[in-house]
Image (cartoon, coloured by chain):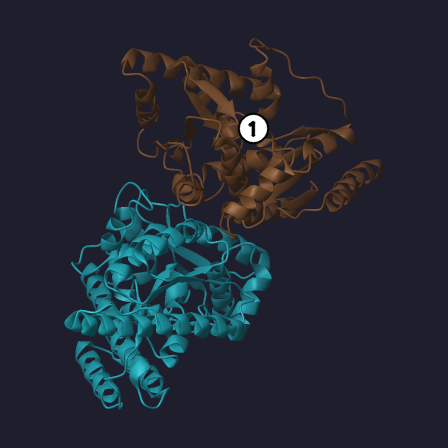
Chain colours: A brown, B cyan
Amino acid sequence: MTVKVGIPRALLFYYYFPMWNGFFRALGADVILSSNTTKAILDKGVRQSVDDACLPVKLFFGHVLDLKDRVDYLFIPRMVSVERKEYICPKFLGLPDMIRYNVPDLPPILDVTVNVSRSEKNLFKAFAEVGRVFTSNPRTIRKAYNRGIEEQERFHRLNHLGYLPHEAIEQMGRGLLNQNHSPARQGDMTIALVGHGYNIYDSYISMNLIQKLRDMGVRVVTPDNLTGTIIEEKSAELPKKMFWTLGKRMIGSAFHYMRSDSIDGIIHVASFGCGPDSFTGEIIERHLRRRRNIPFLNLTIDEHTGEAGIITRLEAYVDMIRLRRAAQ
Amino acid sequence: MKVTFPHMGNMYICLKAVLTSLGVEVVVPPMPSKKTLTLGTQHSPEFACLPLKINMGNFIEAYEMGADTILMAGGVGPCRFGYYAQVQREILEDMGLKMKMVVLEPPQKHISELLIKIREVTGSSSWIDVVRAIRFGWHKARAVDEVEDVLHRIRPREYEPGRADVVYKKALKWIDDAHDRNELKDAISKARQELDAIPVDNGREVVRIGIVGEIYVMLEPFVNLEVEKQLGRLGVEVERSIYLSEWINDHLFMGLLKIKGSKEARKHAPPYVNHFVGGHGQETIGSTVLFANRNYDGVIQVQPFTCMPEIVAESIIPTVSRDLGIPTFCLIVDEHSGDAGVLTRLEAFVDLLARKKEKNTVKNTVLQSSEKKGEQVCADI
């Protein structure tokens, strides 16, 4: 019987799933995903986690609860740092501990530490440590690791072509590997959606934001459609390097999009109580306001968000951009 | 050049000592007040943590008093504090307040990066003078901690509540006014004398509570709603997990001096928190374990709303509490915190601890006497 590894469909799933998936499959394990977010999953997560945690962390708890009885292992890596001298948010650093001490009756957790802050080689070390749970053959592990990296590169290529991460994951799941064309999108304007992947691509907690915008005739681009070089270059405009990887992506992409002629507006999506967002959002808003050329909308989501309020604000925002354009 | 800096508890005493003894003109912002908070909240991002807002209020008030340079600390994450200065600079720029910001960052490549920054403030003084000034500031920090230590012991035991606090305020003033080491020594002995003169009831059974959590909220009485004073009045002996001088040693001297520091606390955090989580998250857990080992009656965790490292700690503390049998209480502060509500909660917590302690003492004495007689007694009274 094959070993079943569970990956919660939350948080860094939207950034690294192809790598994890490729790696575990090459090791001969079955990868089981939690279901798509529903109200029940979110409610369970909210009940199980500490009140002050942010929405995506609460949601992660919900996905763990959804998954825990169906798998042999839970894969919850401790993602300390994915780029040099940078961190992800402190809550990611303590995530395996938070889960372990708050969710009863868990299967064994694969909680390797991924920390490339000092050296890039640590990434392989982390994977090797997980790999040893499944096989003692170092060559198999190396192969699986390469396979994971390959999948991740394919994923990035799809993102850069214009597929959003959740669409790219779906595409790859269907086996369409050699996609070379950008997806065709209808619309008369383009809006950059700047926010954490786990907030904007989860159609339940984002209130289906992307689809709503598309229905209004808006093309949507996100930080994930940009290459790492652009992000690095634009975020370097700040006098001090931003030490949150995800925050840097948001700053870099906002700075890029605000100079782009093809962008009509920028929407910043933050979750209530998110630490880095409170700073990145502030910096983006202040820089945009000084330039005065691109309309900016700040949406804060939490577990209570009413859908009607979001729709009203989006409609008003899109209408305003259209009126503005007509007036020019 | 008129230099100012943000407040953090009694930190101003040391910083002022260091800078004035180097001949730098210093503007100490007014002690944090409602006005500071209102000014700060008005101009800061809504979801930023409270220390940033108080800092902003300090800067604005200092600007009104004529300050033109801000001395601020930096950091390399993942706690938000490391990016405070950057956000604050953007806000000041948009407000049109022209203030220069000198940010002391931990050196990334070479120590000279830090030294250059220090030079920007100290000007032409020689390095020997700088070192001497820093040592003087350090001694002031030790002096403040020494007085606080005595204060924490006296507060729950004094016959007339409030007397120790009056002396404490005076003592801080004496320490602040001392110009050299000799005057500082006099100030300390004077403070000790006055504190020792306060009539206390040493036989009183007091509840002992350890305070852990985020450093700024722990050290700044305005922000933590004077939790130490309130507890003292309720008859509680308080000990903080970290004192000013220990923080200075850990963060500014890179732990060079061999005094108690956060290393000990971090060592006790596993298996609950196995990795550094930024800020003082790991120390919070480790200190809770330490307090439990030292048989404290309870632990209070303080944190600003949305503090990331402390949220990690907060979600794990209940497990520590269960495993080690130490009651814990979490106090989260933001700009809306009202002291009446907090006081009620503190009273309830202290009552519970006192009841538990009483019960245990009775149980122990009953058990001891029953052991002598060799008969079974119902210990649950």
**Residue drawn at the location 54% of the way across and 47% of the way down:** A47
Residue extending farthest top: A178
Residue at the spot of label 1 = A224
Along the line of sight, which residue is nearer the eye, A234 or A268? A268
Along the line of sight, which residue is nearer the eye, B257 or B163? B163
x and y percentages locating residue B251 in the rendered image: 29, 55
Q: Is residue A211 left or right of residue B340?
A: right
Classify A2 as above or below B159: above
Q: Quadrant of the C terminus of chain B?
A: bottom left
Along the line of sight, which residue is nearer the eye, A165 or B340? B340
**Residue drawn at the location 32% of the way across and 81% of the way down:** B156
Classify B381 as above or below A279: below
Q: Quadrant of residue A103?
A: top left
x and y percentages locating residue A188 in the rendered image: 78, 27
Crowding at dot 1, Cα within 10 Å, few <14 / some 14-19 / many 20+, comes out as many
x and y percentages locating residue B182 in the rendered image: 17, 80
Q: Quadrant of residue A166?
A: top right
Q: Secondary structure at mark 1?
A: helix
Q: Is residue A241 visible?
A: no
Chain under numbered label 1: A
Classify A233 as above or below A152: below
Q: Is residue B66 left or right of residue B154?
A: right
Q: Amino acid at mark 1?
A: Asp
x and y percentages locating residue A102 in the rendered image: 44, 45
